[in-house]
Image (cartoon, rainbow, N blue to C red):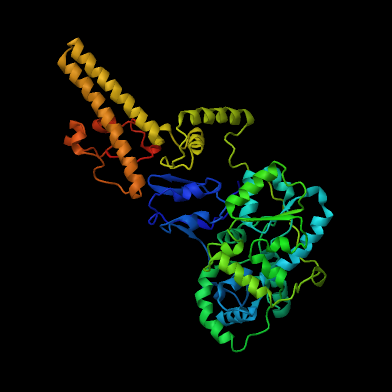
Amino acid sequence: MDKFFHSVYLDEELCMGCINCIKRCPTQAIRVRHGKAVITGKFCIDCGECVRICPHHAKLIRRDSVDVLKKYKYTVALPAPTLYSQFNHLDDINIVLTALIYLGFDDIFEVSAGAELVSAASREYVSEHPEKWPLISTACPSVVRLIRVRFPNLIEHLLPLNPPVEVAARLARERAVKNTGLDPEDIGIVFISPCPSKVTYAHSPLGVSKSQIDHVLAIKDVYPLLLPLMQRARQNPKELSMSGRIGVGWGGAGGEAGGLITDSYLAADGIENVIRVLEDMEDEKFGRLQFIELNACNGGCVGGVLTVENPYVAKAKLKHLNKYLPVSMNHLEDYENAPMAWTDPVEYEPVFRLGSTFSESIRMLKEVETLCGQFPGLDCGACGAPTCRALAEDIVRGDATKDFCIPVLKNHIHELAGNYMELLDSVSQSGADSSISTASVRQYIEKLMGEVSLLDAHLEAQNEGGKKKESVSDPSLHATELKEDAPQSRTSAPFQAACPGKGDCVHCAYICPYY
């Protein structure tokens, strides 16, 4: 996959190494290694599910601050319709838009206005291309990225139209250049976003080579700044709103599909439901549908992790606002050469492919199946991977070993213990030289205790977030050499003797009790 910007990142200081995020990631992009979560960039679709689920707030989102307004001679705000749903007792959108002017913006171009244009273009495209039914909405960048990496057979069903925010950004810049006479570079287009997915889109768009969005602010960052300004704006709100019910309705699940003015559609929200719908679509279960609207966030964009209001309360507020709005205020005939269609194709990115060739992939897949048969199938996550199959794929790729699996490691310890007992029996029955027998027993004891300590250390790392302990097992259980010479080097003889991995520290997943 091409290297693109990721808005979601990890704060290792806050990460405790729990497995909440790895179990919820829709693309299995997260592993826990050395007691810390690790995000695999090529798998990540920036849906923000890990941000939502992390109890330690270790998953963060890159975005800009209001200070970016100072960089430009003229700035235009692109408020997402979700912004209107965050405020109590709001019955006039112009109050919010006027507050944005007071905040420092020079002009406003509503994303909901762009949404109405996209709705009109979608109606035309859907009616003219029945051979592609059902067409899939491309307004949610995370859904498009998910299809791009996991459902290549469905790419041809993607609606090849720019999302409303991109349409709004391009029209806003054109209008600002026309009204001010400034160079396009002197005009800042700033989107106020409900989610990390659209932050990523601004830096690495799909369907176009370069987005017209210059910066992205989070709704939850702008919200507290707007509250006092809205009190002032209520006194004399400016007439800035230029969108109706269809555009504002895009903020909630079903709003986009509702704008098509057809009953032959399906709307799903929440990333798990989205995946279920896409899997059913691959099985050709929706042949009679014309359009499928998919949103990665529960409730639609109102459920984005950069919002402040409960998504279901927010959706109710949007419904209340719509009572005061006309159906639509924007039509394609009013905008000549509106930038509606994609200019760049969206292509399949085989990031999950195991091998570089077909034969290699088949061989590696057989290895995965063999490994899955050796694992208990608990999908417990203690190994740092979300499922046993994910661990098997990591092993085949060379990113893990079988000993990452705790049950496998325990079984190995039991085998060592059995060998130890057999050795004791053979020593007692053979009457062999005592020094040789003692050395053999000591060797087995050291190996067994090394495995036990390794297991204890791994469990400690999982429970305590990978914080290294001075001792993770009873010191009396350690071999004599380790007591007398606590090794500080991987090349020391005691370390080499006790290490179950034979000193292969680079590929060891555990906090080592010896080094």
Using the image as rendered, state which of residue 85 and residue 505 is in the foreground: 85
Residue 5 is drawn in which quadrant? bottom right
Q: Nearer the viewer, residue 316 or 486?
A: 316
Q: Which residue corresponds to the image point at 81% horizontal and 60% vertical from the top-left? A: 124
**Residue 295: quadrant of the picture:** bottom right
**Compared with residue 36, is residue 208 higher up or lower down, i.e. above or below?**
below
Query: Which residue is nearer to you in this view: 491 or 448?
Result: 448
Residue 279 in the figure: left or right of residue 370: right
Residue 253 vs 450, above or below: the answer is below
Name the image quarter holding residue 292.
bottom right
In terms of depth relative to the viewer, which is nearer, 404 or 508? 404
Extreme residue in the top direction: 430
Q: Where, quadrant-wise, is the C terminus in this rendering?
A: top left
Residue at 63% over, 64% down: 252
Q: Position of residue 448 (x, y in %)?
A: 28, 29
Whether residue 79 is visible: no
Above or below, 507 relative to 462: above
Residue found 62% across the figure and 41% down from its top: 350
Image coordinates for residue 377, horizontal then vertical, percent: 47, 35
Residue 120: x and y, percent? Answer: 78, 64
Whether residue 175 is visible here, answered yes or no, is: yes
Classify 266 as above or below 394.
Answer: below
Q: Left or right: 426 with respect to 180?
A: left
Point out residue 49 in the picture as x, y percentages from the top left corner.
52, 55
Q: Residue furthest bottom?
A: 235
Residue 87 in the figure: left or right of residue 378: right
